[in-house]
Image (cartoon, rainbow, N blue to C red):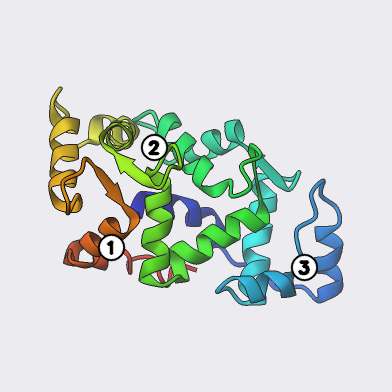
Amino acid sequence: MGAVVGTLTMQTRQRRPSRDKVDDDLELSMVCHRPEGLEQLESQTNFSKKELQVLYRGFKNECPSGVVNEDTFKQIYSQFFPHGDASTYAHYLFNAFDSSHNGSIKFEDFVTALSILLRGTTTEKLQWTFNLYDINRDGYINKEEMTDIVKAIYDMMGRFTYPALKTDTPKQHVDAFFQKMDKNRDGVVTLDEFILSCQEDENIMRSLQLFENVI
């Protein structure tokens, strides 16, 4: 969770002086994709209008066209992990942000996901994370999916991975994950099992609160 939120909010934390509504609407009209009105996004997210303005300017600064394709997303995300290969994890993360599954992330997709990760309820945050891990979107997390996620995280961390990655380390992590999460031992983890197991883990619960005041 920390890797998801921390890197995606660093570029939006620098605040600029607010502008009036006319200037903001003019800015929104000068990109290829025009986002929904700020009032509508304010009602759909847990951000104020002023926070949305700050987020939008940061988003537009990185993506002048108003949309982000996967290659651009990977380039931006990889900047935060210069000693590793973040491309695979960024691919999974991109798919989680791409709510319409059309191969691009719009500002609406970005702030909707960020709203959940930063200001959502515990259940909303855990459901979003479950969907990130559920690579094939069948409603379950299987061992192959979890192995792919764990390997992608190790690749992303690169030589700073601790403890040092051994051949069997991903399997050990996955086995521990399923030992904890797979309550009925059927070989897959359901959303209900995932949420229940996470709620029973104090460390996971604390990690969900780390970025609540990041913006």
The x, y position of residue 172, in whole percent, is 12, 35
The residue pinned by badge 3 equals: 37
Disc 3 is placed on an element classified as: loop
Q: What residue type is labelled 2?
A: Phe
Q: In this view, does 197 lie to the left or right of 99?
A: left
Q: What residue type is labelled 3?
A: Gly
The residue pinned by badge 2 equals: 81
Q: Which of marks 3 and 1 is nearer the N terminus?
A: 3
Q: Which residue is drawn at 50% across and 46% down?
A: 96
Q: Quadrant of residue 104?
A: top right
Q: Do the residues labelled 2 and 1 touch (CB within 8 Å)?
A: no
The x, y position of residue 86, in whole percent, is 41, 33
In this orientation, does residue 114 appear? Answer: yes
Neighbour tally class for label 3: few under 14, some 14-19, many 20 plus, Cα within 10 Å: few
Q: Quadrant of residue 56?
A: bottom right
Asked if residue 67 is positioned above or below residue 38 in the image, the reply reads above
The residue pinned by badge 1 equals: 207
